[in-house]
Image (spheres, grey):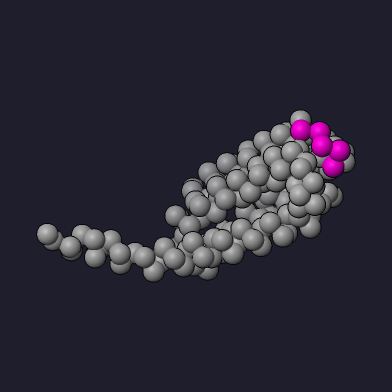
Amino acid sequence: MDWTPVIDSLAGLGPFVVYVGLSLGMIAVYSAVYMLATAHDELALIRRGNAAAAVAFAGSLIGYTLPLAVAAQQSATLLVFMVWGVVAIVVQVAVYWFFRLLMLRDVSARIDRGEVAAGILLAAASLAGGIVDAAAMGL
């Protein structure tokens, strides 16, 4: 049996590990920044079983990781990847603030009260922002 294709494919293992590790780190940074930027305490609410907070936060995580994945695929260097990862953080925080300013000023209070509709709507806005962000990165 010729092991050359397997050995050749393992040559990409190093960059894979680096990009996955950086991605996980950037997701952790994003989560911390996003939780500081919102007017509600996502983790405390989720720990109490608040579905609205869980849905909204899950939407924001997916909305962040979509452009992060595109950045990993499109970036020529790790530095460029990290810069685009920071841009994606800024976009997601801006989505929250624009959503709060333009659509539902009391979204955090509604999520705090467990209003799932508010959580779903914020999650949808986060996903929409992430999809547009990811598409724009691919240009």
Magenta span: helix, strand or loop, mainly? loop
Q: As drawn, is 18 to the left or to the right of 108?
A: left
Up/down of 55 relative to 2, above or below = above
Q: As drawn, is 24 to the left or to the right of 93?
A: left
Task: Please name whichever residue, 29 or 138, is drawn nearer the observer in this view of the structure.
Answer: 29
Up/down of 68 relative to 127, above or below = below
Residue at 24% from the left image edge and 61% from the top image edge:
6
Q: As drawn, is 27 to the left or to the right of 19?
A: right
Residue at 44% from the left image edge and 66% from the top image edge:
17
Q: Tell me the quarter of the image containing the N terminus.
A: bottom left
Residue at 53% from the left image edge and 65% from the top image edge:
22
Residue 129, x across and y down, in percent: 64, 42
Task: Please name whichever residue, 108 or 76, is drawn nearer the observer in this view of the structure.
Answer: 108
Up/down of 110 relative to 68, above or below = above
Q: Is residue 115 magenta?
A: yes
Query: Magenta residues?
Result: 112-116
Q: Is residue 16 visible?
A: yes
Residue extending farthest to the left is 1
Residue extending farthest to the top is 117
Residue at 62% from the left image edge and 45% from the top image edge:
63
Residue extending farthest to the front is 48
Q: As drawn, is 55 to the left or to the right of 103?
A: left
Residue 102, x across and y down, in percent: 81, 37
Residue 48, x across and y down, in percent: 79, 46
Residue 103: which quarter of the image? top right
Q: Is residue 106 magenta?
A: no
Residue 96, x across and y down, in percent: 75, 45
Query: Count of labels shown?
Result: 0
Q: Is residue 101 visible?
A: no
